[in-house]
Image (spheres, rainbow, N blue to C red):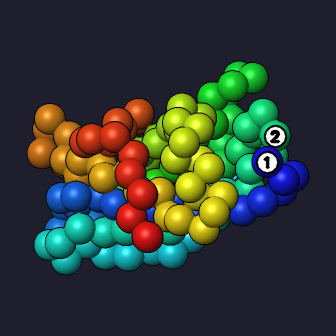
């Protein structure tokens, strides 16, 4: 694995709450790429640098402890829509990506996680959000 090689991860929110703002959140907790949900799935492509280990790095990669790496999707107020009744973040783990999928991503493929859009309360899914099914190669 070459040092600093970049892959793309696609985070697709399957059923976002219509009228709510969603965005990626960078390391400075700034909303990047705000989109207002309109009724269909939303996708965010996230560039991630991988170094041997593998270690995950980049503008959107956050860490917790020595191993856990994740990406935040900001929702409502966190995504820059101050009038929203929600101010949440969805945390999507990336440190558990299987080696075979990482190898395909390093060869230029895009890896996708399909995520639930709604929480038990009917609002936007937040906290640690697990993919609806396993990560997969999409392109």
Q: Is residue 13 visible?
A: yes
Mark 2 → mark 1, Cα distance in angstroms: 6 Å
- Where residue 35 appears, as percent x and y from the top left, is 38, 76
Pointer 1: residues within 10 angstroms few (<14), some, or many (20+)? few
Indicate the quadrant where residue 16 lies: bottom left
Disc sitting over residue 1 in the figure: 1
Q: Are marks 2 and 1 in contact (CB under 8 Å)?
A: yes
Left or right relative to 115: residue 93: right
Camera-nearest residue between 77 and 123? 123
The residue indicated by pointer 2 is 52
Q: Nearer the viewer, residue 16 or 47?
A: 47
In the rendered view of the protein, which quadrant contains the C terminus? bottom left
Q: Is residue 70 left or right of residue 49?
A: left
63 or 18: nearer the viewer: 63
What residue is at 79 percent from the left and 48 percent from the top?
Answer: 1
As drawn, 87 above or below 12: above
Name the residue: 78% across, 59% down.
Answer: 5
Q: Residue at x 17, y 72 (%)?
A: 40
Relative image position of residue 19 (x, y in whole percent): 21, 72
Give the label, 2 or 1, closer to the camera: 1
Does 40 sit left or right of 20 as displayed?
left
């Amino acid at each position: 694995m070459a040092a600093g090689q970049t892959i793309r991860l696609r985070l697709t929110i399957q059923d976002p709450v219509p009228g709510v703002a969603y965005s990626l959140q960078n390391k400075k907790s700034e909303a990047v790429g705000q989109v207002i949900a309109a009724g269909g799935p939303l996708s965010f492509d996230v560039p991630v640098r991988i170094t041997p280990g593998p270690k995950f790095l980049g503008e959107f990669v956050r860490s917790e402890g020595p191993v856990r790496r994740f990406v935040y999707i900001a929702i409502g107020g966190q995504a820059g829509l101050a009038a929203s009744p929600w101010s949440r973040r969805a945390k999507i783990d990336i440190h558990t990506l299987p080696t075979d999928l990482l190898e395909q991503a390093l060869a230029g493929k895009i890896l996708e996680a399909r995520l639930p859009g709604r929480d038990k309360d009917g609002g936007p899914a937040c906290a640690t959000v697990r993919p609806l099914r396993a990560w997969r190669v999409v392109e």
